[in-house]
C-alpha cells in the first residue's frame, strides 16, 4: 500500500479553501453581511495556512491561500460605507472616526500577507514562514484590538 504523506491531504484542503466562492453572494446593499463573509473567507484561508505549517507541508501550497487574503482585503475596506455602523456589526465607531488608521491597519495586513506570499513562492525555510505567518496574524489581530468589539 502506498504511503500517503500527511501534508498531501493538507494540500487538498488548501486547494478547496483557496477556490472558495466569492464573498459577493450577499446583496450589494448589505455591507455588514459582505464584510462578515469576507472575514469568514480570510479566516478559512488563515486556517488552511496554519494547517500546512503545522504539518510541515510544502511552502508552495501556502501561496494560494495567502494570495486569496491579499485579494480579499481591498474589498473588505470598501464594506464600511457611512451608515453601516448600526445593526448586527462588531465594528467600533473608531472605524469611521479614525478612517485613516483603519485603512493603515488594513494595509498592514496586506503588507504582511504579501511578505508571506513572497517567502512561500521562494520556498523559504519553515521557520521563516512560521515567523511571517505570526507577523501576518499580529497585523490582523491589531486591527481587531482597535476597530472591532469583542
Image (cartoon, rainbow, N blue to C red):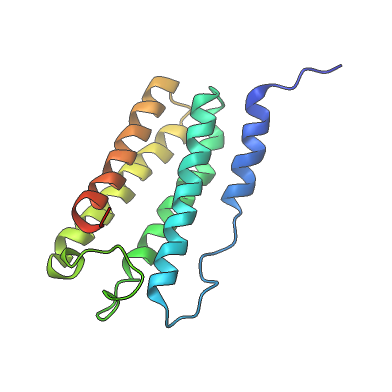
Residue shown at 15%/59% (left/top)? 101
Q: Can residue 27 be seen in this snapshot?
A: yes
The residue shown at (28%, 76%) is: 86
- Relative depth, front residue between 60 and 23: 23
Q: Among all residues in the image, which is located at the extreme right?
A: 1
Residue drawn at point x = 18 percent, y = 68 percent: 93
The relative height of residue 11 versus residue 17 in the rendered view (above or below) is above
Which residue is at the far left?
97
Residue 114 position in % (x across, y down) = 37, 44
Q: Is residue 94 left or right of residue 53?
A: left
Q: Nearer the viewer, residue 96 or 130?
A: 96
Indicate left or right for 28 with 143 as reference: right
Can you give x and y, in whole percent of width and height, for residue 79 in the image? 35, 71
Q: Does residue 125 appear in the picture of this structure?
A: no
Please report the residue visible at 53 percent of the width from the left and 22 percent of the height from the top.
Answer: 56
The percent position of residue 19, horizontal first and vertical second, equals 61, 53
User: In x, y percent, where is residue 33?
Assistant: 44, 70
Amino acid at each position: 500500500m502506498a504511503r500517503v504523506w500527511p501534508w498531501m491531504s493538507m494540500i487538498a484542503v488548501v486547494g478547496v479553501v483557496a477556490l472558495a466562492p466569492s464573498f459577493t453572494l450577499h446583496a450589494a446593499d448589505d455591507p455588514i453581511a459582505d464584510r462578515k463573509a469576507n472575514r469568514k473567507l480570510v479566516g478559512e484561508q488563515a486556517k488552511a495556512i496554519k494547517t500546512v505549517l503545522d504539518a510541515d507541508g510544502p511552502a508552495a501550497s501556502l501561496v494560494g491561500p495567502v494570495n486569496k487574503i491579499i485579494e480579499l482585503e481591498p474589498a473588505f475596506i470598501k464594506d464600511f460605507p457611512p451608515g453601516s455602523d448600526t445593526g448586527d456589526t462588531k465594528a467600533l465607531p473608531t472605524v469611521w472616526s479614525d478612517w485613516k488608521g483603519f485603512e493603515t491597519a488594513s494595509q498592514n495586513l496586506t503588507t504582511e500577507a504579501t511578505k508571506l506570499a513572497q517567502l512561500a513562492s521562494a520556498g523559504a525555510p519553515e521557520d521563516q514562514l512560521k515567523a511571517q505567518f505570526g507577523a501576518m496574524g499580529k497585523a490582523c489581530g491589531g486591527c481587531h484590538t482597535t476597530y472591532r468589539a469583542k
